[in-house]
Image (tube, rainbow, N blue to C red):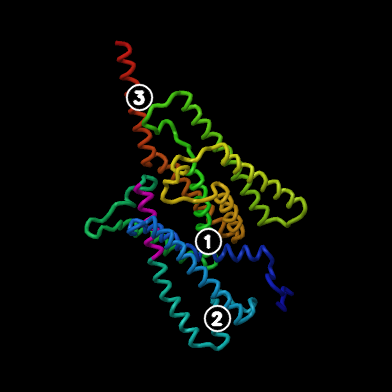
Amino acid sequence: NPADGRTGFAPFGVSGIMTGAGTAFFAFVGLESVVTLAEESVDPKRDLPRATMGSFLIVLVLYVVTAFSIAFIEPWYEVGGNTGLIGSLKRKGLTLPQYVVTAGLIFMVFSCGLCTVTTVVRVVYSVAEDGLLFPFLNSVYKRTQVPMWNVVVCSVVGILSSIVYEFDTLSHMISGGTLTVFVITALAVMILSYDLTDPDMEETEETPLTAEKTHARKHLFIIFMCVFLLATIVLAFLTAFLEQTTAVIVSEVVLAIIMIVSLTLIRCKIPLKAQEEDGTLSFKSPGKPFVQGFSVFVNLLLLFHLEVVALKQLVIYCIVGLIIYFGYGIFFSKITAEKQKRLSLKEIKLDDTGESSVR
């Protein structure tokens, strides 16, 4: 670039590549739409993995081809604003391709909007049905069999967001939200894969020694996970924000060792669920917990390369979600109600046993 002297391959270095990857990550936002339509598929065990990987490959090929097209049309520093490929075609006098791409983008807006609303409505409906959100969000209108208030709330929030935020900030926020969801999903896969059964949730009676071992195993898992998460967050932060001096590199190596050791302890000390060991699960993720741990680190690294403004907005939304969860969801969830019911039944049984022993 004659303006600032940046030339050659990857003029902004690895940091620039990570920033671009984090910004363009919103391209994979629609992949969860495939998963939310699991109830509509004939054979989810077969159809969902194929549909997910097929959608991923199609999106990947289209975005790579588009990026190469822009790169071969004009230098990167001449690509202006948010016009992207359309602006490049216009500056080169390619009128017909410009109109074709513009028409495709117009149709894409409607299809993406419909896909997004369908996905968000299904997710919010499922969460509300589990008791984590307010009941009116899973109420179904009798005549159309559609969660009307759910659709209205999700549509209004989407419209207001598009009005309030600029495109760059909104794209970074969408990418940040998607990366956050992927981090939570990877952590959820790790947690659900291990035998952390709460004795209070079990119908069968356990000896005090077995219950004590179960609680100790849960506490050990929590300690290992907290150490792993803390090391991963600090490592991603150092890699994204600080200059790579010798002291920073040494710190990153130490943190990486701590991550690997904590994951190894989880794998060796915490047993997998019985279904994981005998292979009877329909959906499995290999390499637990190392693949999931690496996924958490990469997603956090991409997340920290987004705009600071988008990160601040994302933190605000996360705080609002936590307030809703700890203020409402944790008290009215189905799991909490089921646990209270089981505890009540155990207390009744203990009372009956005490009365019979007295008699």
Q: Residue furthest left?
A: 143
The residue identified by callout 2 is 87
The residue where tag 3 is placed is 347
Quarter-of-image position of residue 342: top left
Name the side, left or right, on which 131 lies relative to 286: left
Q: Nearer the viewer, mark 2 or mark 3?
A: 3
- Residue 128 placement, left or right of 291: left
The correct choice, above or below, for 210 with respect to 278 in the image is above
Badge 2: how crowded within 10 Å, few (<14), some, or many (20+)?
A: some
Q: Residue 44, position in %: x, y?
A: 37, 56
Separation (CA) of disc 2 from disc 3: 71 Å
Residue in the image at 54% along x and 34% along y: 219
In magenta, the rendered stretch is 115-129
Q: Specify which label sits upstream in the sequence, 2 or 3.
A: 2
**Measured from the top left, where is residue 37 in percent x and y?**
37, 59
Q: Quadrant of the C terminus?
A: top left
